[in-house]
Image (spheres, grey):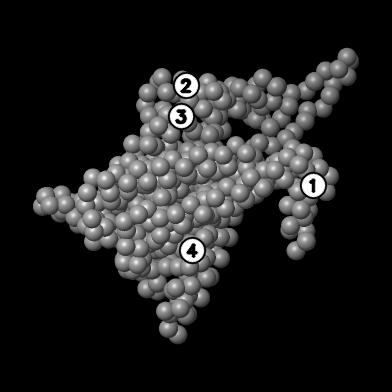
């Protein structure tokens, strides 16, 4: 056990890493405190009773770390920012000007991030209005006046902006990806409560089903670890070098291609989008116009977490975002040009465009395998839930996907910082 925590203990001996860890802990504490700062004017007791009987709202509550149950100022979570990120990445692929900006290195990426923040603000306002109308129609907000609407909308939108700021501070000064880490903390903080409630009301027959859930959780965890750690090793050979009259022997190395290059991002993006139809349906079903009510009821009925349409959409979104994000972060042409520049090549493949085409071909194949596995793990809890009758499986399964992926990504970043310091004896295996 001491070997497991030894890298963390050693990291506290380095002032730079110690500061990063302390900042990370401080931001997480601030985030959890904000989760208990409520927006005024909502009946919290009635809201919590509705959350227990509504699987969709319960799922949102888990992803926001219990903030919806408290109706805190950060009840919207990071959904507006995630949606804005998806829109900006799609726009970057459509508009050449934005694509050119994104390729201008760190400065271009900062500009794209600024556009994403600005886009997240109107999205947060729209979602705050929808949340207000939804709670009003559920009878959770009794008063109905412009000042109260303004208070709720501004409070929720400001909470999202505050979370965006915390996430960026965490990315810049802490350890790991700030946005992913905040989502992880929210799930970890809320999921045990849901599991405890399920275990409390379970009878003897359901206890066996809970054991099945635990076994499934272990299976999903092992699967995600396997996919994240899997690599396809591409042999790379360096050209022979001549030193005077002597010929140096060719050196070999390997280019590791991850089975899942995108990490946790496809899951977070997919969950964020797959929740939108049900959220929109909840809003539209309460409107006075009959056509909109019909559309809303259709969305609510067909985008429950146990429905076929929901799971098919979830699976396809995970699949699509895995390919989409891999295409953004993995550039075979750039890698091929770097290999050619330093005199390295893949045996049997011409340097340059042929190498880029070969790497792209390999990457598509392994990404397809990783995406199919990841999508299957995403919908598997729902399938088992319908067999066992435990709705917690759907919530817990998706949560496990995000939690395990974030832990692995954060651990890799932490390990890379230790390696950068070249501190002897840090990594014990």
Q: Nearer the viewer, mark 2 or mark 1?
A: 1
Residue 375 in the image, given as x and y percentages of width and height: 44, 52
Q: Earlier in the sequence, mark 2 or mark 1?
A: 1
* Quadrant placement of the N terminus: bottom right
Q: Which residue is at 47% across, 31% downward?
A: 113
Q: Residue furthest left?
A: 290
Query: Does residue 301 appear anywhere in the picture?
Result: no
Please give the residue where the numbered disc 2 appears in the rendered image: 101
Q: Earlier in the sequence, mark 4 or mark 1?
A: 1
Q: Answer left or right for 298 relative to 88.
A: left
* Alpha-carbon span between mark 2 and mark 1: 40 Å
Which class describes the residues within 10 Å of circle 2: few (<14), some (14-19), or many (20+)?
Answer: some
Residue 345 in the image, given as x and y percentages of width and height: 66, 27
> Residue 13, which numbered label?
1
Q: Residue furthest bottom?
A: 204
Please give the residue where the numbered disc 3 appears in the rendered image: 114
Q: Earlier in the sequence, mark 1 or mark 3?
A: 1
Q: Earlier in the sequence, mark 4 or mark 3?
A: 3
Q: Nearer the viewer, residue 136 or 13?
A: 136
Q: Nearer the viewer, residue 131 or 82?
A: 131
Q: Which residue is at 38% across, 29% downward?
A: 91
Please give the residue where the numbered disc 4 appears in the rendered image: 191
């Amino acid at each position: 056990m001491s070997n497991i925590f030894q890298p963390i203990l050693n990291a506290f001996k380095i002032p730079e890493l110690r500061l990063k860890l302390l900042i990370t802990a401080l931001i997480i504490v601030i985030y959890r405190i904000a989760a208990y700062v409520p927006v005024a004017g909502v009946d919290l007791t009635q809201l919590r009773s509705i959350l227990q009987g509504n699987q969709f709202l319960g799922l949102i509550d888990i992803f926001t770390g219990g903030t919806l149950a408290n109706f805190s100022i950060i009840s919207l979570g990071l959904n507006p920012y995630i949606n804005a990120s998806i829109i900006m990445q799609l726009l970057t692929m459509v508009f050449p000007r934005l694509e050119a900006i994104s390729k201008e290195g760190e400065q271009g990426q900062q500009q794209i991030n600024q556009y994403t923040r600005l886009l997240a603000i109107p999205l947060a306002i729209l979602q705050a209005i929808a949340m207000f109308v939804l709670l009003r129609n559920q009878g959770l907000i009794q008063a109905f006046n412009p000042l109260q609407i303004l208070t709720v909308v501004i409070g929720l939108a400001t909470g999202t902006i505050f979370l965006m700021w915390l996430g960026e501070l965490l990315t810049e000064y802490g350890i790991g990806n700030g946005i992913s880490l905040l989502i992880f903390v929210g799930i970890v903080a809320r999921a045990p409560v849901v599991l405890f409630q399920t275990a409390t009301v379970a009878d003897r027959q359901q206890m066996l089903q809970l054991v099945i859930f635990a076994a499934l959780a272990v299976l999903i965890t092992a699967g995600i670890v396997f996919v994240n750690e899997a690599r396809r090793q591409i042999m790379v050979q360096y050209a022979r070098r001549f030193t005077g009259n002597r010929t140096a022997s060719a050196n070999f190395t390997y280019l590791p291609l991850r089975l899942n290059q995108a990490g946790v991002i496809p899951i977070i993006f997919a969950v964020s989008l797959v929740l939108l139809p049900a959220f929109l349906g909840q809003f539209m079903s309460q409107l006075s116009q009959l056509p909109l009510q019909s559309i809303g009821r259709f969305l609510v009925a067909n985008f429950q977490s146990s429905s076929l349409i929901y799971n098919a959409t979830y699976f396809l979104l995970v699949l699509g975002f895995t390919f989409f994000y891999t295409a953004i972060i993995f550039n075979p042409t750039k890698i091929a040009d770097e290999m050619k520049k330093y005199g390295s090549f893949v045996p049997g493949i011409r340097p340059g465009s042929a190498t880029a085409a070969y790497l792209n071909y390999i990457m598509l194949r392994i990404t397809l395998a990783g995406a199919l596995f990841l999508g299957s793990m995403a919908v598997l809890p729902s399938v088992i839930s319908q067999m066992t009758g435990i709705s917690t499986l759907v919530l817990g399964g998706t949560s496990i996907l995000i939690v395990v992926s974030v832990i692995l990504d954060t651990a890799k970043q932490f390990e890379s910082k230790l390696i950068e310091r070249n501190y002897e004896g840090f990594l014990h295996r």
